[in-house]
Amino acid sequence: MNSGSDHPVQVPVSNRLSVPESSQIDDAFFMNVRDRFLFHPFSHRCSRVLCTRYSQNPWLLLIPCFLLIPCFLLIPWTSLQQARAVSPQKAISTCFDMTLRNESKSQNEESYPNAPTFLRDITYGWQWRGSAAAGTSTSGDTIDLPFWLHSNRFGEFDRYSANTTLNLFGFWRHTLLSGISFDAKTNILIRGAGHSVIRLQEGYIQAGYGHFLLSAGRKREDFGLIHPDLSMGTVDLSHNTWPMPKISLATDGFQPIPGTHRVIYYDASLAHGWMEDSSYRFNSNVLLHQKHLYLRIFTEDAPISPRAGLKHFAQWGGDSPYYGKSPVNLRAYRDVFFSLASDSKEIIDGGELPNYFQNHIGSYDFALMVNLGRYKMSISRQFILEDTPNARFGTPWDGMWSAWIELRPDPRTRWRAGHPSDWRTDHRPFVKAVNYEHINTLDGLTRYPHRDAEQHVNYYNHWAYRGGWTYYSRVLGNPLFFSDKDYYGVVNNQLVGHHVGLMGYAGSVDWRFFSTYSRNYGAGRVTDFEGNRVSGLTDRIDQWSFMLEMKTNMFHPSLETATTLAFDFGEAYVNNFGVMFLVRYYNVSPN
């Protein structure tokens, strides 16, 4: 490039997709941050308090995450200053690398001429789906959908009838050279079913800078160390219901911790939400507190990468017909944040804590990721947190095991589904990934013999917040903990389940298969529509659910079609067979 040229700088693809060495922060900066923040006397006092309190309250593990936030806020500013000190071409690529998110990396692979002072992406499209079932009906008029036609689909389908849906969606991103990005997304759902709706299925605005994202609205979230395509969902928050309106501050994935020479990474978030589904729960105007902290050792592609995390959710505030209005103030928020009102060793009323104003749910999450060339493997364990014995590993077998193996693409080829000219069939394996999961919530029945089945930990239910861990009558966590149209909250939380998922390619078709078995015993206490808590225990009920999904965009790269077949057999759900058809069109317009 000639220094005297009047033409804007053109940024090659290779520069935008790799971070220049000059944009990395030197060790002196890390040491300065460490000495100024981590070894401050105040931090030492906090550490002593944490060590004293942790034995009684494991939730306090999240405090270090938020103590380190001021350190991390300085990193993007320093990176930008060093980027400006190098050549304009490297400065531009540095800013792009700091702000481009994984969601649109594939959209930005082609070179943009004249290197503008901003990067803008616009994606829009529509999606139609139709689903129906044949079998036994529980509603008297229509046939219920099979389990995998309505579960983990963000609550877009009415379980108790045939459905036809139309989604109109759009995504916009604007990225500045200053390192700031702005995102906006909208997804309007129009559903014709037994319960028809027109609603904003997903809609949010988001600002990003450096390592952090600040968002507001209804946004789909992914938590946990499970397989993103083959899992049946984490034990605390899955894709089973409509995204809740929230304000969230989160890291943009895993980020390196200063002073660790990119050996230790962290992923964290803090959010406040509104459970405005008052007509679907016994309490009204309930609020949500949410936070998580994950740590990872080594990079994503290291031969071995251990990970560990803690997730914490709490329902608080709101109005109860029995207990009145719960406090909503700074003191109440402090108690919710640190789980202070749950600091009790006494277990009452079905294994729940004597806590009128808060319902705490969470999980410990551990995983070991192994990379062996083209094979990637993971073994993970989630421990459910619902009461004090859970938090102290008193019921170690309650939770979910997960193991999966995935074949990654050869670096010389692409596996992108699309028009036949975009892929090579000899490099698209018939089986790409295999996932197995096992869930169990019956351990407490044998470890605490003084409790009978009705006094067992009533997972996802709460004696004061009687709508339980649900949102619009759908369970927020793993869908094997299911709800029912005749009760508030969760009607099945004593169970043992096994789940197998496979995915791969058959020529131009991407396929995915689920096989799920569960042994169900109901719930110790359920809440009827009068607010009464009654026994929900049942005899052993076995259930099988299957799904086969096939999709392709062989006809046009921007047009995707799919067919999904599902089948239920057992006593927990009705015996039925269902089919779903999908047609989706999307367009990407970089400017």
Image: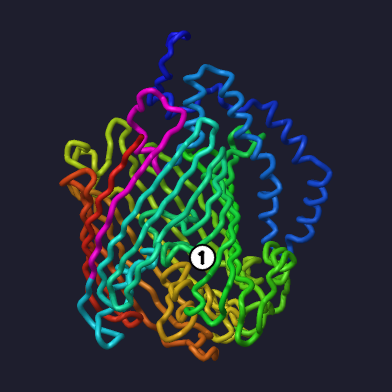
- Residue 332, image quadrant: bottom right
Residue 40 forms part of the magenta stretch: no
Answer whether residue 477 is visible to the viewer in this image: yes
Report the front residue among 318 and 431.
318
155 over 35 or under it: above or below: below
Residue 122 forms part of the magenta stretch: yes
- Residue 449, image quadrant: bottom right
At 70% from the left and 26% from the top, the residue drawn is 28
Question: In the rendered view of the protein, which quadrant contains the C terminus?
Answer: top left
Report the front residue among 536 and 121.
121
Answer whether residue 446 is visible to the viewer in this image: no
Q: Secondary structure at mark 1?
A: loop
Question: In the rendered view of the protein, which quadrant contains the N terminus?
Answer: top left
Residue 544 image point, x, y percent: 31, 73
Q: Which residue is mark 1?
A: 236
At 48% from the left and 32% from the top, the residue drawn is 97
**What is the magenta range?**
103-131
At 36% from the left and 55% from the top, the residue drawn is 229
For the residue marked with disc 1, what is the amino acid? Asp
33 left or right, relative to 192: right
196 left or right, relative to 202: left
Task: Count residues near mark 1 (Cα–Cα under 10 Å), then give few for <14, some for 14-19, many for 20+.
Answer: many
Residue 156 image point, x, y percent: 35, 66
